[in-house]
Image (cartoon, rainbow, N blue to C red):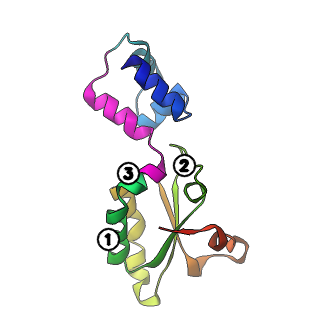
Amino acid sequence: MVTTLRSEREAANLTQARLAQLAGIAQSNLSALESGSRKASTQMVARLRKAMRRPSQVLADHREEVMDAMMVCGVENPRIFGSVAKGIDTPESDLDIIVTVPEENAWRFVSLRPMLVDILGIDVDIVSENGLAEKHQGILDEAVPL
């Protein structure tokens, strides 16, 4: 397990300090786990592995639930942009989503972000296509369908 945690952290391109922060533990505890001076519980290993997952992986695992939430909130044409769309996301990345919000569903749209954060357990930025400033219209060109 010692080598595995360290190699997994390095493969995720995270420092000990950053992984400890993402997992909510002290860096000294992570160092002890990686060196083998402290045995990692099954729960701790799961917690660390969860903290090392990229948003694209989390989204792939929960895509159906995300699509259900989109339907409940009445949004259309969900697309991903940013690092996930470019395939360069890291465990530190957030998930950027742009949607079309029909006028009659504007109030339901407000509930979408908290629902997605709850489903995915990661930071989500979600914007309405109608709310994009002129200078951000380029997002539409890079966005890919969810």
Q: On the image, numbered disc 3 is attached to which residue?
A: 121
Residue 46 picture location, percent across and down: 32, 34
Question: Relative to 106, is 7 above or below?
Answer: above
Q: Which of 5/38 is in front?
A: 5
Name the residue rendered at 41%, 34% in the picture.
24
Marks 3,1: beta carbons within 8 A = no
Q: Label 2 vs label 1: CA separation? A: 23 Å
| Kind of residue indicated by mark 1 | Asp
Sort mark 2 into few (<14), some (14-19) or many (20+) by Cα contacts within 10 Å.
some
Relative to residue 75, is residue 65 drawn left or right? left
Mark 2, secondary structure of its residue: loop
Tag 2 residue? 93
For this view, does 87 lie left or right of residue 39? right
Q: Report which quarter residue 68 is drawn in.
A: bottom left
Residue under label 1, please give it: 68
Picture layout, residue 34 above or below residue 73:
above
Q: Amino acid at mark 2?
A: Ser
Give how far across and how far down residue 12 sits, in percent.
52, 35
Q: Earlier in the sequence, mark 2 or mark 3?
A: 2
Towards the viewer: 125 or 70: 70
Q: Nearer the viewer, residue 56 or 125?
A: 56
In the image, 9: left or right of 130?
left
Query: How far across and how far down the image is residue 34, in percent?
Result: 43, 18
Tag shown at residue 98:
none
Disc 3 secondary structure class: loop
* Numbered range of the magenta stretch: 39-57
Q: Which amino acid is tagged 3?
A: Gly
Query: Between disc 3 and disc 1, whose residue precedes?
Result: 1
Q: Residue at x 47, y 23 (%)?
A: 6
| 17 w.r.t. 59: above or below | above
Q: Residue at x 61, y 56 (%)?
A: 86
Disc 2 to disc 3, C-alpha distance: 12 Å
